[in-house]
């Protein structure tokens, strides 16, 4: 029976796609991808490419990123209606997301609308932060430790509290927030125990061990994440 | 050149191994697996099995779980010395871990000893909690939200603070701590917004939506995790 698949394709390296995702990608008749960010669009498709069938139809749709929640929902509902139509016509339809579909992805909104009408399945993917930890050889968490994942777009008090509470804190989307993040790390005396990775697991990967030399006005890619560790191995 | 590979094999389903892990598993000459927990040993090997070569040598070694840190280190150093010898003799050696090697795995200790002497590479795996979120169709985190991963073996004040601070909290290893965890969730009025999964993505998988009916003396498997969500979709 035709189904809708939400497929996590991992952080960048096509080989970090799961065996299940690679199989399902090959079975898709249609794939929907966001075209909002030109870079992330081509990135997601290029990661999935080795597994896609030649007959695959690619439908690029506009998923607005900055509009109001109401505006966004209207757009998603239009795309969802199109997906329901495709699946009810017997097509296997996929939506591919960088990293994992359940971690900071617009997929969640789409799934919430679709699941009432058609059969859906979500396939987890490798997250950018676990991939980073492997590259760095630094555990995210061990034994009784805890860790948190916090977007640098949130308020500074929340980041501050997370840095007090947890042994490891992953700070996502730091690129445009270095003016807030760097002084906060300095206050906690954690600048030297912070790892920065840009474009995890891809050819463009940048790794920094310690951000004490990083200027607050540095130009970093949108795909930049910090791992702040109280206990560096 | 021969190498040591730390390979995450995901939460239980052999298809949730990455393409990279499946390829490297097939290239291994020797695999080391812990025999401390009889169940987890057979589980890890059975997940990896479809990808292993027929010539593979399996070395089961004792990784103590409850001994003192000094005792444990002594054991790891003995195993590390054996691994170094194997790699220096030209063998590709692997260590497989459930989920991800950088999230609550003894692998980190082993890596820390080994990396001085031989070439090492770590391959990330799907974590139990992202797999759970996909199964449940519930995002771990969206937009400005944050989430934390906290073991129920830590002190109750830390779990309490995490539940106050974050939108989603993953509580690991809850099986023997229900007497502490359930009253805490009741205090936060989150019992009905807590999802429980045991044996994620395997045939024995158990899913509960809401733990308000769960008795504090329930017998649960060691592989039981809760996802506590303030904003259920």
Image (cartoon, coloured by chain):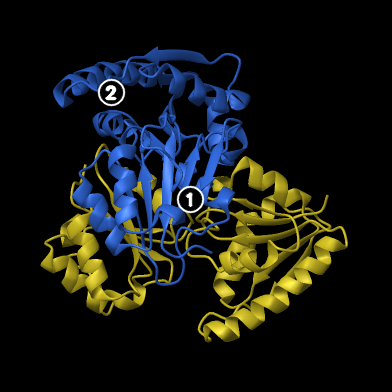
Chain colours: A blue, B yellow
Between the residue at mark 2 and the residue at mark 1, the CA separation in whole angstroms equals 31 Å
| In the image, farthest residue toward the right | B89
- Mark 1 is surrounded, within 10 Å at the Cα level, by few (under 14), some (14 to 19) or many (20 or more) other residues, namely some
**Image-quadrant location for residue A187:** bottom left
Residue at screen point 56% across, 28% down:
A47
Q: Nearer the viewer, residue A156 or B94?
A: A156
Residue A164 visible (yes or no): yes
Residue identified by numbered label 1: A210
Q: Position of residue B39 (x, y in %)?
A: 55, 72
- The answer to whether B224 appears left or right of B146 in the picture is right
**Residue A44: image tag:** none
- The answer to whether A173 appears left or right of A14 in the picture is left
Q: How many marks?
A: 2
Residue at screen point 53% across, 16% down:
A56
Residue identified by numbered label 2: A65
Determine whether the residue tagged by mark 1 lies in a helix, strand or loop: loop
**Image-quadrant location for residue A92:** top left
**Image-quadrant location for residue A2:** top left
Q: Chain of mark 1?
A: A
Q: Is residue B11 above or below residue A89?
A: below
Residue B228 visible (yes or no): no
């Amino acid at each position: 029976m035709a189904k809708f698949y939400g497929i996590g394709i991992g952080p960048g390296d096509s080989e970090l796609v799961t065996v299940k995702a690679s199989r399902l990608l090959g079975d898709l008749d249609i794939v929907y991808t966001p075209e909002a960010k030109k870079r992330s669009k081509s990135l997601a498709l290029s990661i999935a490419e080795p597994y896609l069938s030649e007959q695959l139809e690619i439908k690029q749709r506009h998923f607005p990123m900055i509009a109001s929640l109401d505006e966004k929902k209207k757009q998603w509902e239009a795309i969802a209606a199109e997906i329901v139509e495709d699946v009810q016509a017997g097509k296997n339809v996929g939506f591919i997301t960088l990293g994992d579909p359940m971690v900071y992805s617009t997929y969640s909104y789409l799934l919430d609308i679709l699941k009432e009408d058609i059969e859906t399945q979500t396939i987890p993917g490798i997250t950018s932060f676990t991939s980073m930890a492997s590259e760095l050889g630094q555990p995210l968490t061990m034994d009784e430790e805890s860790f948190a994942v916090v977007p640098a777009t949130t308020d500074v008090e929340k980041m501050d509290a997370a840095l007090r509470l947890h042994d490891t804190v992953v700070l996502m989307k730091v690129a445009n927030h270095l003016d807030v993040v760097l002084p906060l790390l300095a206050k906690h005396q954690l600048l030297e125990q912070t790892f920065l990775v840009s474009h995890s697991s891809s050819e463009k990967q940048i790794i920094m061990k310690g951000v004490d030399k990083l200027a607050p006005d540095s130009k970093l890619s949108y795909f930049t994440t910090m791992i702040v560790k109280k206990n560096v191995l």
